[in-house]
Image (tube, rainbow, N blue to C red):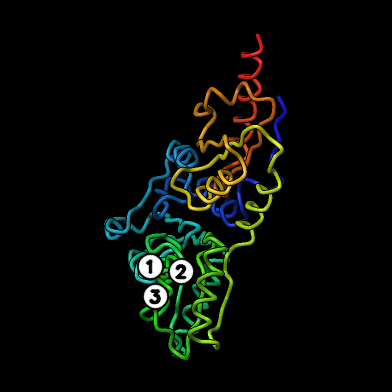
Amino acid sequence: MKIIRAKVLGYCMGVRRAVEKLEKAIESSGNKKIFTLGPLIHNPLVMQSFREKGVNILHEENICGIDSDSVVVIRAHGTTTSVLKKLNECGCTVIDATCPKVLLSQKRAKEWSEKGYKIFLAGDKNHGEVVSICSYAENPVVIENSSEAKNLEIPEKSILLAQTTFSPHEFNSICQILKEKNKDLVVFDTICSATMERQNALLELKDKACGIIVIGGKNSSNTKRLYETALTICSRVCLIEKETEIPAEFFSLETVAITAGASTPDNIISQVENELVLGYNRCSF
């Protein structure tokens, strides 16, 4: 079996940074209780490994119940200004692992909102990153698709931001629609380059494999987009979180391509590769 890895796959800078911050907190915490504010990243296997090290998930409604002798790590998606205030009032140690690119969007939303601009954000209304950015602006508007954009009024002073993992194609469509309504719209293309790099690396695999395996959390936005893209270039595609989920048909393929979402660690990618080889060898006898 020939296995082709996408040139860019797995952990992005923001996720790797968040994981490293949590690992460092575990090493230096002593007897302190460690929490992540919601799931640190969208990968259940990674979160399970941290639970086994004593890390618990803290939900917003339970913040007031933690004591000052606790460590809370803010996930890569960031959090809202009101939640930050509650954490500071509790007196616990807060480690901010928000992705630097999300921090920049938060800063822009705050600064431009204070200048009197209307903030528009292209993204998923329920995504943690979008919720966090919106908390820094006054009455922001989230746009999930171009259809919603067509029904909006765009004030003279307006800016457009994007969720870092938003679809570039959908963002461009939204931008074009809003620009037709207001040519002076200020646009910040805040889609993370890591998202585009993984998408482009995947597209390079077209016609090079009999099947494509996408590895990552099934509740991960960027992993889902990789899966959707893979379906456009190959008829045999699967989305898995671990090696035990590889469909049986993939073990009989001569060539398999692999890509992975930005929340997928290197060891899981390697485990999938190893299982493919072992499974192929079993089928050969």
Mark 3 surroundings within 10 Å by alpha-carbon count, few (fewer than 14), some (14 through 19), many (20 or more): some
Label 2 amino acid?
Ser
Q: Is residue 61 above or below residue 208?
A: below
Question: Quadrant of the image for the N terminus?
Answer: top right
Q: Which mark is residue 198?
A: none
Residue 77, image x, y percentages: 47, 60
The residue that mark 1 highlights is: 88
Q: Look at label 1 and name its amino acid.
A: Asn
In the structure shown, which secondary structural element does the residue marked by tag 1 occupy? helix
| Comes first in the chain, label 2 or label 1 | 1
* Left or right placement of residue 106 versus residue 9 in this view: left
State whether residue 152 is above or below residue 245. Answer: below
Q: Quadrant of residue 14?
A: bottom right
User: At numbered mark 3, what does the secondary structure look like: helix, strand or loop?
Assistant: strand
Q: State the residue lying farthest toward the top.
A: 285
- In the picture of the structure, the residue carrying the numbered disc 3 is 141
What separation in Å lies between label 3 and label 2 (alpha carbons)? Answer: 13 Å
Q: How many marks?
A: 3
Query: x%, y% of residue 120?
Result: 45, 76
